[in-house]
């Protein structure tokens, strides 16, 4: 699973550990991360297999130790669920997540753009009592420099209502002497004067960029998808910074499937008050994909013990607490919005501090011991 997270750009989907977000093992997530849960599941299966290979009457002391180890590990997970590695501070924030439910087939058409912009603005105007209003990935179907007048109007709305807007938007970075031109999949803040920006780093192959595009583009129509020429953002980016009552609030932003990378998420989570992920899962249609995506986002909230808000185009839009529980979610494939409260969290879990390094070292030790035993045999 670890190799799959980075080999050939990585695709860390469907880990064994993700299936245990709602079981006793979830208590281990803030300690070991999702790889630790996968390790425990694999070890449990291996030990049980070794025990069941022989009739109970032929068991030796090692078989009893294996069963005891399984029971104690799972029981420890239940105990760890009550551990609070982080704590809430300050007043809760009221957030509204707008779910526009716009089909990919019409999203980028010029005639659809004013309809989309009006929908976002009118829906948001109904929630001016919220501290933060979130629009999904690439919600604004214009480049940032093309949407200046629109953003200025919303800046005024945000200043009047003391509301911060956060939205996904394509961002065009013109060519300079030191940097080539780039198109970024980005998220921006506006309305409170902070104007923070984050450029997506983990791009989806063939969806957002085409590997070896000088060879593949034009060869097959599939490789000419709209908006599939994005470039990755720099690696040293900081959390989004917004203002509330004179204080700065730091938000760790993740766009689309960036949220499924455990160690990538923890780096920004270290210095953030809560997590934000925006996505457009309409590509999945009515498949199980959006449900899996939400499940993995819940795991990130639990690993770092931070609240997480998830704004999407077609669903599943949700608010998740620091224990990975879904507090509320919007109905999928509906033009709607979701309003709830988010707590600011402080403190670091063992996983946030050290990441997957301890569990990977443990795996390495097991591999070395296993190989040495085989060589002796």
Image (spheres, rainbow, N blue to C red):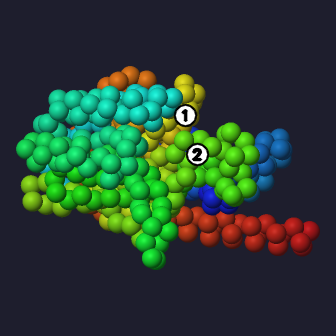
Looking at the picture, how far across and down is residue 128, in whole percent?
14, 36
Looking at the picture, how far across and down is residue 93, in whole percent?
19, 45
Q: Nearer the viewer, residue 104 or 294?
A: 104
Q: Residue at x 50, y 68 (%)?
A: 180
Q: Are marks 1 and 2 in contact (CB under 8 Å)?
A: yes
Placement of 2 over or under 16, stated as above or below:
below
Is 67 left, or right, of 94 in this rendering?
Answer: right
Reading the image, the residue beneath label 1 is: 283
Looking at the picture, how far across and down is residue 320, in whole percent?
35, 41
Q: Earlier in the sequence, mark 1 or mark 2?
A: 2
Q: Tag 1's secondary structure?
A: helix
Placement of 307 over or under 248, stated as above or below:
above
Q: Is residue 322 visible?
A: no
C-alpha distance separating marks 1 and 2: 10 Å
Q: Tag 2's secondary structure?
A: loop
Can you say which quadrant of the picture contains the C terminus? bottom right
| Residue 200, numbered circle | none
Placement of 31 over or under 24, stated as above or below:
below
Q: Nearer the viewer, residue 28 or 47?
A: 28
Mark 2: few, some, or many residues within 10 Å (few <14, many ≥20)? some
Reading the image, the residue beneath label 2 is: 207
Numbered marks: total: 2
């Amino acid at each position: 699973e670890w190799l799959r997270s980075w080999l050939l750009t990585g695709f860390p989907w469907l880990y064994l550990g993700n299936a245990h977000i709602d079981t006793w093992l979830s208590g281990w997530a803030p300690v070991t991360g999702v790889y630790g849960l996968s390790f425990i599941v694999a070890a449990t299966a291996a030990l049980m297999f070794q025990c069941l290979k022989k009739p109970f009457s032929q068991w030796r002391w090692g078989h009893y130790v294996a069963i005891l180890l399984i029971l104690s590990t799972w029981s420890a997970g239940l105990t760890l669920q009550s551990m609070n590695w982080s704590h809430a501070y300050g007043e809760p924030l009221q957030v509204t997540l707008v779910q526009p439910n716009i089909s990919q087939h019409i999203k980028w058409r010029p005639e659809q753009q004013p309809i989309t912009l009006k929908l976002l603005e009118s829906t948001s105007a109904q929630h001016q009592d919220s501290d933060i209003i979130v629009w999904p990935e690439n919600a604004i179907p214009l480049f940032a420099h093309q949407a200046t007048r629109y953003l200025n109007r919303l800046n005024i709305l945000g200043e009047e209502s003391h509301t911060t807007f956060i939205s996904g938007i394509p961002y065009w970075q013109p060519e300079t002497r030191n940097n080539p031109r780039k198109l970024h999949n980005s998220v921006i803040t506006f309305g409170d004067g902070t104007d923070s920006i984050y450029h997506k780093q983990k791009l989806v192959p063939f969806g957002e960029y085409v590997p070896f595009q000088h060879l593949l583009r034009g060869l097959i129509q599939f490789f000419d998808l709209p908006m599939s020429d994005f470039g990755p953002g720099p690696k040293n980016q900081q959390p989004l910074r917004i203002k509330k009552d004179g204080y700065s609030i730091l938000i760790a932003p993740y766009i689309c499937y960036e949220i499924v990378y455990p160690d990538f998420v923890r780096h920004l989570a270290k210095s953030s008050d809560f997590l934000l992920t925006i996505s457009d899962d309409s590509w999945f249609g009515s498949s199980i994909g959006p449900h899996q995506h939400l499940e993995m986002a819940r795991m990130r909230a639990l690993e770092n013990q931070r609240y997480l808000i998830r704004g999407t185009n077609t669903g599943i839009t949700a608010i998740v607490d620091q224990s990975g529980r879904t507090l509320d979610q919007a109905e999928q494939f509906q033009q709607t919005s979701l309003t709830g409260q988010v707590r600011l969290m402080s403190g670091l879990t063992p996983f946030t501090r050290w990441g997957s390094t301890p569990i990977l070292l443990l795996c390495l030790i097991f591999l070395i011991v296993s190989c040495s035993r085989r060589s002796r045999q």
